[in-house]
C-alpha cells in the first residue's frame, strides 16, 4: 500500500482537489492509480484509485452508500432521501430495486427508442444555427429529461419543470460540499418539488404494475411500496438518470471529436459506435467519484477499514489504471470493458441500457447528418460538482453544413 502524497496536492487535500469546479485534472487521473493507489486524505477519507480494489469495495456487503453522519444526527434527512434505493442496503435495497425493474424491461425500453429519436430530431430542428451550436444547451441538457419523462410515463412537456425542480436534489446526492444554509435550502426545495411530483404518482404506480415485463423482470413483491418510497425513488430515477446522461453525452462527443480521425472512422463504420461509446465513457466518466462507508471492520488486500471509515473511489482514475487497461489512454473499441462508468455491485446502475440507447441515438444521428462535425473551441469550461464531471458548454461546428452540402 502506497501512502505518499502526489506532488500536485501541495495546497489542497485530494478531496478538495477532486471536488473543485475550477480545477481540471486529466493528468492526475491518468497517473493516480500508479502514484497513490490507496491514500488516506487529511479529511480522513480513503481515496482508492486502482480498478481491482475499487471493484472489490463496491462488491463488498460490509460497505454501504449511506453516510453514518445521518445515523449519528450530524446530517439531517428531512427530505427522506435515504429511502432512495441508492442509500438502502441488503433486502430493503433488493426490494426497491426489483419494484422498479419493470420500467427497464427489454420490451419497454425498445418501445421508447422511436420517441427518443423523434425528440432528438425535434431538438435538432429547433437549433437556432445548425452550423454552430452548443451541444450541452440544445441537446445534452434536454434529451435526457425528455427520455425520463417517457420512462416514467409523463408528457415530455413536463421535462423543463422537472429539470428545474430536481436541481436541489441533485446537489444533495452529488456529495458537493454544501454549507449548512445551502443544505437547508436544498432540502426545502427538494421537499417542495416532491409535493409537485405527487400528482403523477398514481400513474407511475400503475405503470410499474402493468409495464410489459417477463416474470424474471417482474419478481413478486411481498408488499406495496409506501407513497414516500414510490415518490422518492421516482425522484431518484430523475436525478440519477438526468445529470449523468447529460454529462455523458458531452463527455463522449468531446472526446470523440478530440481524437484525430475517430469521428470520420465512426461515420464510415457505424457498427463500431456502441463499442466506441463504451470506451469514450471509460475515459470520461460522468460520475468520477463514488462514496462508500464501512458498516463494520473489513480487510481487503491493501486496505483495512474500521467501522465508519469513508472511502472515495476515484472511478475516473480506476478507469485508466494501467494494471487493468493496456494503453489506457487509447480508445480501443475492441476492449469491451466498462470500467466503473456505471459503478459495480448491488448499486450498479439500473439505467445502463437506457443510457446506452440515448448515447447511441445521439451518435448515430449526428454521424449520419454531420459527418464533418468538429469542436468549435478547445476551451469549453469543465463542470465539476461533487461526484459529477463534464462540460458546461460544448460548442460544435458542422463543416459540411457550412460548405452548403
Ligand atoms: C450515462 C448515463 C449514466 C451514468 C454514467 C450512470 C452512472 C451510475 C453510477 C456510477 C451508479 C452507481 C452509484 C453508486 O454506486 O454510488 C448509478 C446508479 C444508479 N443509476 Fe445510473 N447512470 C446513468 C444513467 C442512468 C439512467 C438513465 C437511470 C434511470 C433512468 C439511472 C438510474 C440509476 C439508479 C436508480 C441508480 C441506483 C441503483 C441502485 O442503488 O441500485 N442511471 N448510475
Image (cartoon, rainbow, N blue to C red):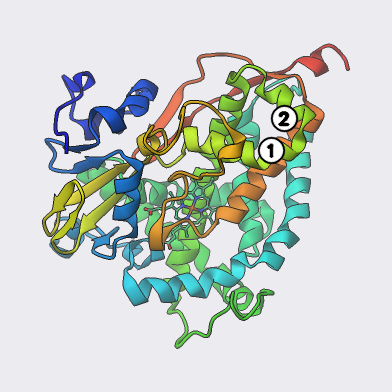
Q: Secondary structure at mark 2?
A: helix
* Left or right, 309 with reference to 237: left
* Left or right, 146 with reference to 279: right
Q: Position of residue 284 (x, y in %)?
A: 48, 33
Q: How many marks?
A: 2
Which label was assigned to residue 273?
1
Of all residues shown, which one is farthest toward the top? Answer: 403
Are dots 1 and 2 in contact, CB under 8 Å?
A: yes
- Residue carrying label 2: 266
Q: Position of residue 27 (x, y in %)?
A: 36, 21
**Viewport quadrant of the N terminus:** top left
* Depth check, front residue: 197 or 391: 391
- Residue 83: image quadrant is bottom left
Q: Secondary structure at mark 1?
A: helix
**Viewport quadrant of the C terminus:** top right
Q: Position of residue 105 (x, y in %)?
A: 63, 68
Residue 166 visible in the current orientation: yes
- Compared with 347, 199 (above or below) is below
Cβ(mark 2) to ligand 1 < 8 Å? Answer: no
Which label was assigned to residue 304?
none
Q: Residue at x 66, y 58 (%)?
A: 150
- Compared with 313, 372 (above or below) is above
Q: Residue at x 76, y 36 (%)?
A: 270
Counting residues from the N terminus, which is met first, the one under dot 1 or under dot 2?
Answer: 2
Q: Residue at x 43, y 46 (%)?
A: 340
Q: Residues within 10 Å of mark 1 (few under 14, many from 20)?
A: many
Q: Residue at x 32, y 25 (%)?
A: 31
Q: Position of residue 320 (x, y in %)?
A: 41, 33
Residue 228 visible in the current orientation: no
Cβ(mark 1) to ligand 1 < 8 Å? Answer: no
- Gap between marks 1 and 2, in whole Å? 6 Å
- Residue 263: image quadrant is top right
Amino acid at each position: 500500500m502506497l501512502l505518499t502524497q502526489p506532488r500536485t496536492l501541495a495546497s489542497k487535500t485530494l478531496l478538495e482537489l477532486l471536488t473543485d469546479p475550477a480545477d481540471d485534472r486529466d493528468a492526475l487521473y491518468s497517473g493516480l492509480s500508479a502514484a497513490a493507489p490507496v491514500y488516506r486524505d487529511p479529511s480522513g477519507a480513503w481515496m482508492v484509485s486502482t480498478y481491482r480494489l475499487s471493484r472489490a469495495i463496491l462488491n463488498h456487503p460490509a460497505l454501504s452508500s449511506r453516510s453514518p453522519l445521518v445515523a449519528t444526527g450530524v446530517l439531517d434527512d428531512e427530505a427522506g432521501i435515504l429511502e432512495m434505493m441508492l442509500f438502502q442496503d441488503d433486502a430493503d435495497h433488493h426490494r426497491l430495486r426489483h419494484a422498479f425493474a419493470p420500467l427497464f424491461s427489454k420490451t419497454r425500453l425498445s418501445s421508447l427508442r422511436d420517441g427518443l429519436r423523434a425528440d432528438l430530431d425535434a431538438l435538432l430542428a429547433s437549433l437556432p444555427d445548425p452550423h454552430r451550436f452548443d451541444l450541452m444547451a440544445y441537446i445534452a441538457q434536454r434529451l435526457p429529461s425528455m427520455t425520463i419523462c417517457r420512462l416514467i410515463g409523463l408528457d415530455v412537456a413536463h421535462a423543463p419543470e422537472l429539470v428545474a425542480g430536481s436541481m436541489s436534489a441533485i446537489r444533495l446526492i452529488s456529495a458537493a460540499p454544501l454549507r449548512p444554509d445551502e443544505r437547508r435550502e436544498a432540502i426545502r426545495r427538494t421537499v417542495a418539488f416532491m409535493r409537485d411530483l405527487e400528482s403523477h404518482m398514481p400513474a407511475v404506480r400503475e405503470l410499474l404494475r402493468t409495464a410489459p415485463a417477463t416474470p424474471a423482470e417482474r419478481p413478486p413483491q411481498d408488499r406495496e411500496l409506501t407513497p414516500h418510497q414510490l415518490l422518492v425513488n421516482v425522484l431518484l430515477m430523475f436525478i440519477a438518470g438526468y445529470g449523468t446522461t447529460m454529462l455523458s453525452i458531452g463527455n463522449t462527443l468531446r472526446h470523440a471529436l478530440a481524437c484525430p480521425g475517430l469521428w470520420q472512422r465512426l461515420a464510415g463504420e457505424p457498427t463500431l459506435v456502441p463499442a466506441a461509446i463504451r470506451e469514450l465513457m471509460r475515459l470520461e466518466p460522468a460520475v468520477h467519484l463514488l462514496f462508500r462507508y464501512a458498516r463494520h471492520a473489513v480487510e481487503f488486500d491493501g486496505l483495512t477499514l474500521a467501522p465508519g471509515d469513508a472511502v472515495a473511489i476515484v472511478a475516473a482514475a480506476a478507469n485508466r489504471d494501467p494494471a487493468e487497461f493496456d494503453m489506457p489512454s487509447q480508445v480501443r473499441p475492441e476492449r469491451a470493458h466498462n470500467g466503473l462508468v456505471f459503478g459495480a455491485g448491488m448499486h450498479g446502475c439500473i439505467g445502463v441500457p437506457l443510457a446506452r440507447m440515448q448515447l447511441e441515438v445521439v451518435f448515430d444521428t449526428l454521424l449520419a447528418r454531420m459527418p464533418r462535425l468538429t469542436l468549435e473551441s478547445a476551451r469549453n469550461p469543465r463542470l465539476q460538482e461533487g461526484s459529477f464531471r463534464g462540460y458546461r458548454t460544448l460548442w460544435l461546428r458542422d463543416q459540411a453544413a457550412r460548405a452548403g452540402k
